[in-house]
Image (spheres, rainbow, N blue to C red):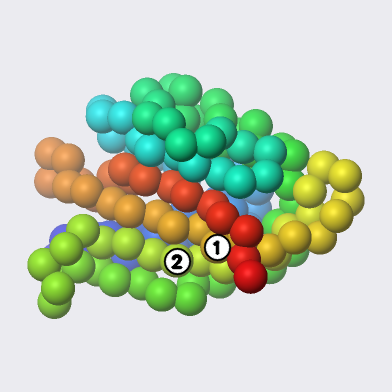
């Protein structure tokens, strides 16, 4: 059951990236800190409280326009006994109008019986 719920979180996060809205992120940030690490124009390698993470995601999404996005790998963690994670590949236009590609890594943990985002990393795709 928790595996299905984790996949639903990944789908909502993908929708948020696609639409350029931070709402799904806010919904799935837990009480603990979130590790954020974005390459171009975003926060670099830090732990942030829920409100800080929401602000940083909002700012990052304002500075980019998603052109395409899709899952390249999803693991609900059930078979491997690990935390659920997903990889998305995203094509986007930055604030200078330059087209770029990045890979987005999302990791989840259980908190009070619900899946929450514990890590978001975006690195340039090769």
- Label annotation for residue 68: none
Q: Secondary structure at mark 1?
A: strand
Q: Give the residue at x 75% y 60%.
A: 100
Q: Residues within 10 Å of mark 2 (few under 14, many from 20)?
A: many
Image position, residue 51 (x, y; %): 44, 22
**Residue where numbered disc 1 is placed:** 103
The answer to which of marks 1 and 2 sits earlier in the sequence is 2
Q: Secondary structure at mark 2?
A: strand
**CB atoms at circles 1 and 2 under 8 Å apart?**
yes
Q: Is residue 119 visible?
A: yes
Q: Give the residue at x 37% y 24%.
A: 49
Image position, residue 12 (x, y; %): 45, 56
- Label annotation for residue 87: 2
Image position, residue 116 (x, y; %): 28, 44
Q: Is residue 126 above or below residue 28?
A: below
Q: Give the residue at x 36% y 35%.
A: 34
Image position, residue 37 (x, y; %): 49, 42
Q: Is residue 86 above or below residue 121?
A: below
| Quarter of the picture holding the N terminus | bottom left
Out of 96 and 4, give the one closest to the viewer. 96
From the viewer's perspective, is 26 left or right of 70? left
């Amino acid at each position: 059951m928790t595996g299905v719920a984790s996949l639903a979180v990944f789908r909502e996060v993908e929708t948020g990236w696609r639409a350029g809205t931070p709402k799904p992120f806010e919904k799935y940030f837990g009480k603990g800190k979130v590790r954020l690490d974005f390459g171009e124009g975003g926060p670099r390698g830090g732990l942030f409280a829920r409100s800080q993470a929401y602000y940083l995601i909002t700012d990052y999404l304002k500075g980019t326009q998603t052109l395409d996005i899709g899952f390249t790998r999803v693991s609900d963690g059930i078979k491997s006994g690990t935390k659920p994670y997903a990889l998305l590949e995203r094509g986007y236009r930055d604030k200078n109008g330059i087209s770029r590609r990045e890979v987005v890594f999302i990791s989840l943990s259980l908190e009070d019986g619900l899946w929450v985002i514990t890590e978001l990393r975006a690195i340039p795709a090769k």
